Image (cartoon, rainbow, N blue to C red):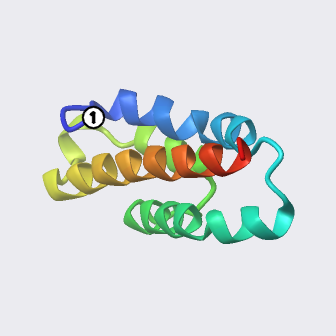
Amino acid sequence: MTSASPDDLVVTFRSIPRRLHEARGETPNDEFDGLSVELNRLLLEAGGLLRTTADPARVADAIATTPADMWVVATLDRLREIALAIGNELRKIAAAGER
């Protein structure tokens, strides 16, 4: 993901709701709420970087509408890091749902 293009990031963020639904499995609500704290924090950070909400679709839209010559490298790099961290959080949620 370190070389992920903005288009790759758009796909990643758009897929989060589906992946979260799949990862949740049979996880009870109280446990799920605890497990999703970091995921929510990461989405909030991504939204903040792009001056939008934490909604993954809004983050994806903001990435998609940013012209290539307007990207700040540090922002794009941080979004890549966030996308990797979100994948890790989704795996943790999935593992909890499999217990």
Q: Quadrant of residue 31?
A: bottom right
Q: How many marks?
A: 1
Indicate the quadrant where residue 95 lies. Answer: top right
Residue at image point 39% right, 36% down: 9
Q: Is residue 15 left or right of residue 45?
A: right
If the image is split into quadrants, where does the N terminus sit? top left
Q: Residue at x 58, y 65 (%)?
A: 40
SS of the residue under disc 1:
loop
Q: Residue at x 30, y 38 (%)?
A: 67
Nearer to us in this view, 57 or 78: 78
Q: Is residue 41 above or below residue 15?
A: below
Residue type at mark 1: give it: Met
| Outermost left residue | 73
Nearest to the observer: residue 52 or residue 39: 39
Residue at image point 38% right, 28% down: 7
Which class describes the residues within 10 Å of circle 1: few (<14), some (14-19), or many (20+)? Answer: few
In this rendered view, identify the residue nearer to me: 16 or 61: 16
Q: Position of residue 42 (x, y in %)?
A: 47, 63
Q: Find disc 1 in the rendering and name its residue.
A: 1
- Please tell me which residue lies in front, 42 or 47: 42
